[in-house]
Amino acid sequence: MDASMLYALRDPLGVPAAPIIFLLLGVLTWALHIAAVHVLLGASSLTLFGSLNKNLHWRRLADAMVSTAKIAVSVAIVLGVAPLLFVQVIYDPFWYTSNVLSAWWVIGFIAFLIIGSLLLFSFYALNSSMKTQPKTRCPGAMLAAIAFFLVVGFIMHALSVQMLKPEKWMEWYAPGGIVDASGRALHAYNFWRFGFFISLSAPVIGLWLIAYRRYLLGRENEDQAYLAFVRRLAMPLISIGGIIALALYVGWMATLDQNVASFALSFWSIITVAMLLLAVAVPFVLSKKIDSGFWGYAPFAVGAVALIVVGAMREALRWTTLYGVHGYNALDYKLHMDWYSTLMFFLTFAVIGGAVLVYLLTVSWKAGQTKGMYVASPMVNRMGTIGISLLAVWIIQYFAIGLWVAYSG
Amino acid sequence: MDLIGLYPTWYEPAIGSGWVIGLIATIHVLFSHTAVGAALLFTYLAYLGYRDDRPELIDFIKKYGTFLLVFSYILGSITGPGIWYSTTVGSPRGISSLIHNFVWKWATEWVFFVIEVVGVYMMVYLVGKVDKATYLRIAITFGMASFATMLAIVGILSFMMEPGMPNWAEKGGYLLGFYGDNTFAQLAIRIAFMFTMTAVVGGIVVAGLKDQVFKTWLARRLAVLGIVSTIIGISLYPWYLSTLPAQAQIVMENRIPDYYGTAILTVLLATIAYFAFTLFKPRMLTASVAGLATLSILILGLFPGETIRESARKPFVAGEYLYSNQVIAKDVPGMTIKSEIPTLEKVGFTHASVFWPESQRDITVNNAHEVGRTLAITACSNCHSLSTTGIRPIAGYFGGITDVSRIKTYLLGALATGNTMYMPKIPLQDKEAEALALYLASLADPTVVARYVEENSKTADAPQKLLPSIDEKKTTSPVARVNVSFPTSGLEE
């Protein structure tokens, strides 16, 4: 499949803003999404392990982690929508082709994700107080949920790999010259790459536990033995999990296709390794400092930055493959600048999204830290009122501009 | 190079990709509309609960909210992108058209959706943990953000039927594509029916309430909400219909099965009857009764409704410029889009399609049947099943005819010229029409292929002889080609 064919597949509508914006938003939102996925997988695994353990600390942790997993699955789904949107904007030829060639798996992705999520919620409903009850009901549901999440992850992985192999598409679509439109096969995957992304769940949940521990430290009369247990668990998850992830990364880079093999020693590859090492090292370097101030949250923040770098590296590899090998430049997409919708999005994202989410998360945080009922301060109340006012302004402008466009003649 | 950007096709012989998309979309409509309606209901109940100091109302929000966490915010959240996924594999250029026109609107909806999801968790888990004024602020924020998601999406749904304003094609741009008569009519009708769905689904939660007095109070209010919203929804329907393009009106009059309209009206009347029942006999409301009512609305109301919306926009799938078979049918100067019909008239699917097996670019006696199959998959299977099951089985339209020549004549005379209502113009080359006709004939009688090859091998120089090229024919009008002979076949009329 030569470049002219790839360009022919592009949507002739073009894009409403500079393509680089979609690329950057894609990287950023993918990093947020994958962070939520890692927390989901890590928390689910700790839930399963803890629920099968008689130790009281493990049971308390399992109780906390199943709640974390439940929220993480929602967050992962919601945050996953954004990179899914942006990949379609500038990589439509690749994403759509890859999806169609494995159509049943794409439909299966929806079904498996629903089943996995329902199993997780079922386990949560059946074990609403693991920390006080010694027996766990139906741990198989949690195990099955994890299995379904891994299958879902593998489908996404395969679709992402397939989109990088346009030279194989015709062979997959019409083997021997006969069209196979069944969409029943997954055609390409790389277990090293998949293993790398999944294994990152271990260090990420370790960093999450450090932050969780710091959050508990903010409460009065917290059980010190439990806090020590959480720390003892988190550190090897970060260090050993991080080393395993790096080993899998090396395996992935070593198995890259010949025409992009040099990427393994590129700037993006090296900085990825450096950032992952830094994220692993930070909690050890901070040592006892993580108990003071906001330092306890620093390791997870560094981990989040490391995941953004991982996302950038993933994007750089895609660019190297599609542009360097196949001659497709995602950044020369036809531009039909649409100022209104572009500005409206960024205003909504930064002003309304920022103001409202800061308010909601502030209330959640304070309520979680308060024993008994949290009474918001005048400052927090003002934040809430501002958020509501901004939402009202958005709705009013929607109707004002819409009615003017539709009925002004 | 004359290429058009047709993607590979996913063809599912048992039920067809159309039904898969329809199924997921219908389920999502129930989840998402219930979510928005419930968010606004929660806002109102939170206001009442704190104004009148009625903690049972806040407790109900917690119960309904917990139910919605799974019902709308897990299943709904998954089936939302699920529609993207299913349309990606069933109609990639259709979803691409919506994405590239409205990416920022979708991204804006995403911002509100994030707020909504954070909001619903707070509504459920902060009951009794924050002061009243704060909880009410969260409820209002949640309700408004949820409503904004509907506002952001409705214009995109309208664009599937037609661009907001007729001059979008000339001028292009987001505003003219998004806003129009149909946008607001559709918004109004969706708002009405979302409250109907909220009231029906809410019944499942109300049925489980232990306090009979409160159960009666709430069931009656949901019943009133359901009756009023259903009646308003029905009364808005003529307005909605009046905003549909003329083509859609004709299609609806002629192509939609009669029982669809009856089914929808019946389910709406049955919905009113159901609410009347819960109004006068609220204590009889059980989870299974409410669940059955929800299922009935899903199967008998929403599915036919979505099917009608889907069918009425044919032969287009987006913006009245993109055919259901993924071919761009018209110029859209405002977005510098060129129709692909001239390219197909010039070189045909076999030479214009990116995903076409090289061995099928040139049509021979021996590969004609396979080329016909590829053509059917590419140009027909989005709307017509090639098997006996699934969506609109194509064989049924030819009444068992096995005469390749007759089918070819129809294809060139009616289909290639765009003279069949409801169908896209499919500008087949003469030899493509022959190949497709052979494939269609073989659906009624598979032995026709062997006979065709045998007969044509006798008259042809060799089995691999190419069918005449376009240049050899020098025909410019597809109509003219109806009577063009087919030297290797000997089947022409």
Image (spheres, rainbow, N blue to C red):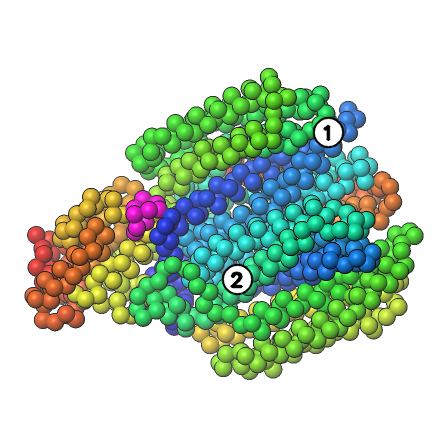
Tag on residue B366?
none
Query: Which residues are drawn in magenta?
Result: B385-393
Residue type at mark 1 is Leu
Q: Is residue A314 left or right of residue B322?
A: right
The front one of A244 and A328 is A244
Tag on residue A155?
2
Determine the image quadrant of residue B194: top right
Disc 2 crowd, CA 10 A, few/some/many (<14, 14-19, 20+): many
Residue B226, given in percent of the width and then of the height, sits at 57, 25
Residue type at mark 2 is Ile
Residue at 77 percent across and 29 percent down: it is: B55
Q: Which residue is mark 1?
A: B57
Question: What is the magenta segment's predominant secondary structure?
Answer: loop
Residue B110, given in percent of the width and then of the height, sits at 60, 49
Task: Give the letter of the chain under mark 1.
Answer: B
Q: Is residue A18 above or below residue B282?
A: below
